[in-house]
Structures are given as C-alpha cells and as structure tokens.
Image (tube, rainbow, N blue to C red):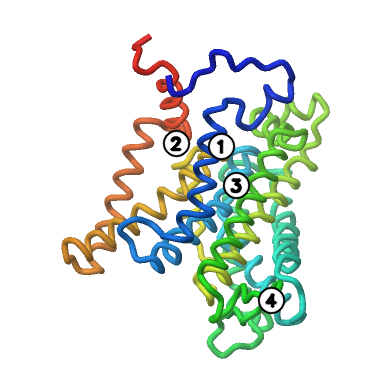
C-alpha cells in the first residue's frame, strides 16, 4: 500500500528505465535530500554532539560509501576480485598531496580528479593479470599490489615530501574564498563538499552501469567466454572496470585524508582497511548501488554508536567497548548473511515488495 504502482503507467521507455520509476521513490529521495542538505548540517544527529556527529559519523560514512561504490563496481558488477583497495586509496591520497604541494594554486576539484586519474592508471597496471587469471589467483595478484604500494608509501620519502614523521598533512587551502581543507577549515564546509562529491559520483556510476560499459562488465562477470563470443572485448571490459573502480577509490582516499582525518600515514592504507571495504560490499550486497550505501553505513556506524552508547550511558571502559563492538558487529554480519546471503540491499528489496501489499497478506 505504501508503494502503489496502480495508476502509474509508463508510455515511454525513458520513464520505464528511470532510476526511480515510482512516485513514492521520488518522495523518499526528496526527504533524504532535505535531511542531508538542511537538517543534519544545521542540527546534527539527535542525541549526539554536533562535532562528533559530523566528524565521526557523517563525513566518514560518505567517504566510505564512495570507497564501497568503487569496489562494488569492480567486484559486484565486473566480477573481478581485489584486495588492494586500501593501497589504491593511498595512491589517490598521496597523489592529491603531491598536486596541492607542487602546485599550490591548483583548484581542489581539479586536484581531486587528477588524483583519481592517477589511481586509475595504477589500478589498470595492477589489473593486467586479470586478463589471464581469475578467482583466488587474482586475489593474490591484487594482494601483491597492496603490499608493494604500502611499502612504497613508507620507503619512498618523496611521496610525503621527506617529512620526518612520514605523514601527509593537509595545509589550509581555499576555493572560492572559503577554506576547504586544513586545520582552519569548518566541518560544515567539508561536509557539503564530500556530500556533493558523493552525489555526483553516485549519479555517474548509476548511468555508467546502466549503459553499454556497465552491461559489458556484467556480461564478463556472468560468463566471460560467452561475452567474448558475442563481441565483448575482455581486455577493454576488465581494464575499464579496474580503471573506473580505482578512480572512485582514489578520490575516496583523498577525501578520507584531507576532508576527514587531516593527516595520515601508510598504516591508514594497509590490508586491514582493504578487508574492511570488502566487508562493506559483501554486507551491503554485490552488484547494488543501494547496497554500497547500506554496507558502508552499517559497518561504520553500528560500532561507533555501540562504543558511544556504552561509554556515555553505561560508563564502560573505551577498550572494553572497542572489543565488544567488534564482536557484536561480527555476530550481526553472520546473522544477516545467514538470513539473506545477497546482503542488506536484497533485504530492502524484499521489504519494498511486502510494503506494496501491506496490510493485505496476498
């Protein structure tokens, strides 16, 4: 009853293939836009400190959604397994750092796009083995990329401008007269920049996936030999998936360091983070943009809220809550995957189907 398709007739293919074909979906997206653009920046999240809500929940959530989108393009839509996500995000972060330090007057948006392109080139280079191998062998190849790039982040001092601490730090940098990054930048400014970036990248991914390129990725994923027989070139399809995915991941890495953390070392791009992003994709649902949102929000927000509630409400020790939140998150992941192996996105689809009939049982 909430999703009434009766009377919503489509007379054009354009309307039938729209991202949100139902009027109720458009209302839901409108409500989300009002919340994210007006309510949350002005009032924060209920029951949480404003700075904590913006700096520990909202900004990292949006960064991880972009990261998960990039990995889901490669893993969920193209069927290419990768454990080098953390390293590719580091490539974007270090590239952004070099661009803004070598060219101090460069526009932040241009630097961000260029850092994504550098990450895309690196992703294509390490994606070349996918032309010959797949499955566990491809995992090993991307794992080698993870270890090699992490080593380079530590040993190649030029990447962090020979800083004694080995860290990359965001200097104060303006755009249109507003300080966007650096110690003096406002949380709301960084929030809006990351939010707009997320919306643009989501729109781009949605259109690419539903177009010719996205269909070629899914054909390679489902049956690469049959796809090649009908004219799909595996070289172009696989490497374009690695490039597109690494582009998103590189942008997310730059946003993570300079719009959220403020500074980072090589440990921020290690193998543990690659596994974290992989868990987000699996939990949310492979081959689903909505699942990328749900997986990133669930894996990041749930432990943060558990730790905050345990410390502020029950007075538990921070170390105890850290371990408890990890255990509880792991248990919830197991339960969700048992109930629905296709992730939270599939659970949401089932819920929408039931809402179309509710309160009737048939």
Q: Is residue 104 above or below residue 316?
A: below
Which residue: 72% across, 15% down?
A: 11
Query: In the drawing, what numbered circle is on residue 288?
Result: 1
Dot 1 or dot 4, earlier in sequence: 4
Q: Position of residue 345 (x, y in %)?
A: 48, 35
Q: Position of residue 269 (x, y in %)?
A: 54, 66
Alpha-carbon span between mark 1 and mark 3:
25 Å
Q: Is residue 161 left or right of residue 258?
A: right
Viewport quadrant of the N terminus: top left
Which residue bears the numbered disc 2? Answer: 343
Q: Position of residue 155 (x, y in %)?
A: 61, 80
Query: In the drawing, what numbered circle is on residue 137?
Result: 3
Q: Nearer the viewer, residue 228 or 295?
A: 295
Which residue bears the numbered disc 4? Answer: 177
Dot 2 or dot 3, earlier in sequence: 3
Alpha-carbon span between mark 1 and mark 4:
38 Å
Considering every residue shown, the one lying at the far top of the view is 362
């Amino acid at each position: 009853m909430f999703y009434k398709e009766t009377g919503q007739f489509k007379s054009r293919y354009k309307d039938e293939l729209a991202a949100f074909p139902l009027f109720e979906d458009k209302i839901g997206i409108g409500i989300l836009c009002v919340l994210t653009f007006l309510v949350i920046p002005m009032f924060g999240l209920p029951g949480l400190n404003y700075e904590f809500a913006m700096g520990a929940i909202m900004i990292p959530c949006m960064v991880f959604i972009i990261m998960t989108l990039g990995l889901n393009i490669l893993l969920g839509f193209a069927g290419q397994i990768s454990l080098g996500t953390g390293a590719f995000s580091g490539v974007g972060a270090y590239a952004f750092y070099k661009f803004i330090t070598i060219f101090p007057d460069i526009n932040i948006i241009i630097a961000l796009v260029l850092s994504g392109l550098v990450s895309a080139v690196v992703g294509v280079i390490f994606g070349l083995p996918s032309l010959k191998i797949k499955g566990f062998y491809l995992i090993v190849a991307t794992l080698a990329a993870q270890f090699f790039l992490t080593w380079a982040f530590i040993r190649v001092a030029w990447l962090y401008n020979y800083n004694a601490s080995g860290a990359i730090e965001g200097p104060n940098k303006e755009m249109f007269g507003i300080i966007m990054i650096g110690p003096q930048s406002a949380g709301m400014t960084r929030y809006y920049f990351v939010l707009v970036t997320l919306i643009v990248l989501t729109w781009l991914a949605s259109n690419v996936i539903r177009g010719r390129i996205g269909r070629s990725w899914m054909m390679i994923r489902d049956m690469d030999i049959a796809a090649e027989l009908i004219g799909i070139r595996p070289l172009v399809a696989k490497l374009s998936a690695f490039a597109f995915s690494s582009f998103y991941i590189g942008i997310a890495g730059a946003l993570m360091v300079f719009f959220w953390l403020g500074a980072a070392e090589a440990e921020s791009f290690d193998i543990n983070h690659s596994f974290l992003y992989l868990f987000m994709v699996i939990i949310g649902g492979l081959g689903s943009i909505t699942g990328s949102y749900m997986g990133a929000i669930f894996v990041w927000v749930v432990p943060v809220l558990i730790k905050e509630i345990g410390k502020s409400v029950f007075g538990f020790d921070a170390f105890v809550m850290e371990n408890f939140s990890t255990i509880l998150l792991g248990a919830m992941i197991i339960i969700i995957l048992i109930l629905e192996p296709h992730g939270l996105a599939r659970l949401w689809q089932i819920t929408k189907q039931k809402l179309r009939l509710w309160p009737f049982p048939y």
